[in-house]
Image (spheres, grey):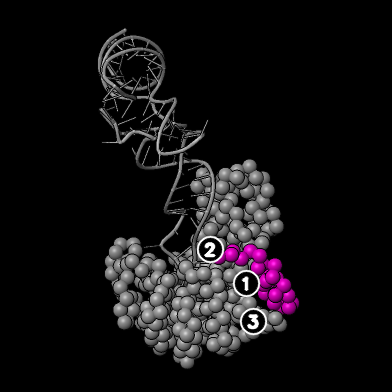
RNA sequence: GGUGGGGUUCCCGAGUGGCCAAAGGGGGCAGACUGUAAAUCUGCUAGCUAUGCUUUCGGAGGUUCGAAUCCUCCCCCCACCA
């Protein structure tokens, strides 16, 4: 068993668990920082470890293009290359099918990409993606899927899902290193029957864990939650559930309430680079804005991270304003710790049976749309 | 002292008779960001009693229906020569 449930919320589907990998266990619910190009932008592995980060992401598409497989082989895999000793989950490149849609051509066996760097052509399908992830030697491999865009007609969603399911089967059949696990990805856009069928087909194939993809691509908050409500009852309870690409704190909390164990999102690091900081209640403030130019209070008065205990909003705003990299780093440190501590608080709330109350306190932060 | 070049909106800088409140940068301000083509992108940036009017292109005059653009004088800056 690669997943063990250690506590359950009496009122919701939330649970605490341990995701077991050969490079260590991961306490869930977990937020996984995104390290697309073999780095969680601006952060050192030591800093991440000290924050309590137990698993990060890497990306098949980006690492395949640069530095390329020869370098990865010579380095002895992604862990050694970037000196991260804890688990790594690699995304399959399926999201790039979505985000780089202008540069691709879909075929039955995969995607013909024009590299966003130099335009050179290459092919990425389930066979290629898994083979690359085998070289990367990530602990959790993701099946190669097509991240369906939104909006999407029913017919297009059917067509897309058929490919994703076929590719899931092929992905599952590819050889992996002994220590590697592989997760399947539920697509199906915002259509109930497609989402349910997608989940059922993946369960039939049988994966080490199950992800829900194709969310936070433009659909409403309600639609995102609805998809979880359709899919979660179909997924095996004793496997890890991963909500891909999500999200904001209130979205994470709602996901956990529905039985999600794993999340990843660029939000903490990207917003940091763009000058925004998370507050303890889940809101963000634009620290780089002129209104903070003379604000001598900490970025978040309730936070005890290195940034908040040593520097003022005025200083961070100044650094951002003049383009000093330290501003970006200080905000990245703060936002990363905010997310890690949010997850720790949630795990504690689940263990002590107070998760639903915790959740209620965060509901007010949900935007109305 | 002589010769040449130049002074433009917060800054740099384009414009050399009407399509100019004046390109483009920068700076400033606001917003966006969800399995990272993102330390990025978008919008606004003279004033007003606002489908129009007022002030603005070193200063003062002038030519013209009309001037940032042409003419005269003045002030200042830069380069080279003495």
State the residue position of label 2: A267
Residue A114 appears anywhere in the view: yes
Name the spot of residue B46 as percent of width and height, x first: 47, 34
CA distance for labels 2 and 1: 15 Å
Q: Nearer the viewer, mark 2 or mark 1?
A: 1
Q: Earlier in the sequence, mark 3 or mark 1?
A: 3
Marks 3 and 1 belong to one chain: yes
Question: What are the residue bounds of the magenta stretch?
Answer: A344-369
CA distance for labels 3 and 1: 11 Å
Could you tell me if the residues under marks 3 and 1 are in contact, i.e. CB atoms within 8 Å?
no
**Is residue A116 depicted above or below A327 in this figure?**
below
Q: How many marks?
A: 3
Q: Secondary structure at mark 1?
A: helix
What secondary structure prevails in the magenta region? helix
**Which of the 4 image quarters holds residue A62?**
bottom left
State the residue position of label 3: A13
**Is residue B19 depicted above or below A296 in this figure?**
above
**Which of the 4 image quarters holds residue A37?**
bottom left
């Amino acid at each position: 068993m690669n997943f063990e449930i250690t506590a359950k919320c009496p009122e919701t589907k939330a649970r605490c668990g341990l995701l077991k990998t050969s490079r260590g266990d991961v306490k869930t619910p977990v937020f996984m920082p995104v390290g697309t190009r073999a780095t969680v932008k601006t952060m050192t592995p030591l800093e991440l470890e000290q924050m309590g980060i137990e698993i990060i992401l890497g990306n098949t598409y980006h690492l395949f293009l640069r530095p390329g497989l020869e370098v990865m082989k010579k380095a002895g895999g992604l862990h050694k290359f970037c000196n991260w000793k804890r688990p790594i989950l690699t995304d399959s490149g399926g999201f790039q099918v979505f985000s780089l849609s202008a540069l691709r051509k879909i075929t039955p066996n995969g995607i013909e990409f024009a590299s966003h760097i130099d335009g050179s052509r290459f092919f990425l399908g389930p066979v290629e993606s898994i083979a690359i992830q085998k070289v990367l030697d990530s602990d959790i491999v993701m099946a190669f899927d097509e991240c369906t865009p939104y909006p999407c007609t029913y017919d297009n969603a059917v067509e897309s899902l058929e490919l994703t399911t076929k590719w899931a089967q092929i992905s599952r059949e590819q050889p992996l290193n002994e220590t590697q696990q592989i997760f399947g990805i539920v697509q199906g856009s915002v259509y109930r029957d497609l989402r349910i069928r997608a989940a059922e087909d993946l369960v039939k194939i049988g994966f080490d864990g199950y992800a829900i993809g194709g969310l936070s691509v433009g659909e409403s908050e309600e639609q995102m939650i609805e998809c979880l409500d359709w899919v979660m009852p179909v997924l095996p309870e004793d496997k890890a559930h991963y909500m891909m690409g999500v999200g904001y704190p209130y979205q994470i909390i709602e996901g956990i309430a529905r039985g999600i164990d794993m999340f990843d999102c660029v939000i903490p690091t990207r917003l940091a680079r763009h000058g925004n900081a998370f507050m303890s209640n889940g809101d963000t403030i634009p620290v780089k804005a002129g209104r903070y130019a003379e604000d001598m209070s900490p970025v978040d008065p309730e936070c005890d991270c290195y940034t908040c205990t040593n520097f003022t909003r005025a200083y961070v705003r100044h650094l951002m304003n003049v383009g000093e990299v330290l501003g970006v780093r200080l905000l990245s440190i703060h936002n990363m710790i905010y997310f890690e501590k949010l997850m720790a608080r949630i795990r504690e709330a689940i263990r002590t049976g107070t998760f639903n109350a915790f959740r209620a306190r965060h509901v007010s932060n949900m935007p109305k749309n």
